[in-house]
Amino acid sequence: ALCDSSQIDVVLFVKIGVELASVRLHSLIGSLSKFRKYRSILSEIDADTCEWIKEIAEESPYLQEYHSFAEYERPSLAVTYEFLMRLNQLGFNLWNDPLVRSETEKAGALSALGETLVRLLRQQSEDLR
């Protein structure tokens, strides 16, 4: 079990989790866009979701702090994806609450993007071998 959801404010937890994951994904997409070899990957991900992530990330107080971390200190895409899956799991436990459902749907959209990025990066890595 992730945790006892009665002990935390699940809406706030998922909301902040979505914000943190948006900061991570926005930064990753920005990093990938600097390299020609990743442009084909970026062309395959949903532009509207990327714009939405950018808006969340740029409004986040965590963005500045995130950029102060060295690259090796930042969570990997796999860790970010796993975190989003855990947020989904937590939210689904309280799906009947409309506020929880709304935030969980956001986490679901981010995890879908994360899953796509993981798949495309893995596929590209295998193609280069």
Image: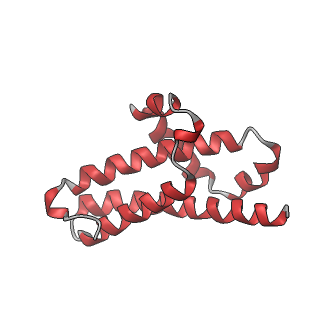
Residue 82 position, x and y percent, is 46, 62
Q: Quadrant of the C terminus?
A: bottom right
Closest to the observer, 74 or 44: 74
Q: Quadrant of the N terminus?
A: bottom left
Residue 13 position, x and y percent, is 28, 51
Closest to the observer, 27 or 3: 3
Q: Residue at x 40, y 45 (%)?
A: 19
Residue 40 position, x and y percent, is 78, 54
Residue 59 occupies which quadrant of the picture? top left
Tell me if I can see residue 105 in this picture.
yes
**Among all residues in the image, which is located at the extreme left?**
6
Tell me if I can see residue 60 in this picture.
no
Residue 100 position, x and y percent, is 26, 60
Vertical relation: 80 (above or below) 95: above
Query: Does 4 sit left or right of 44 as displayed?
Result: left
**Among all residues in the image, which is located at the extreme front?**
72
Query: Does 101 sit left or right of 9 as displayed?
Result: right
Q: How many marks?
A: 0
Residue 103 occupies which quadrant of the picture? bottom left
Q: Residue at x 85, y 61 (%)?
A: 128
Scheme of image coloration: secondary structure
Q: Residue at x 62, y 61 (%)?
A: 118
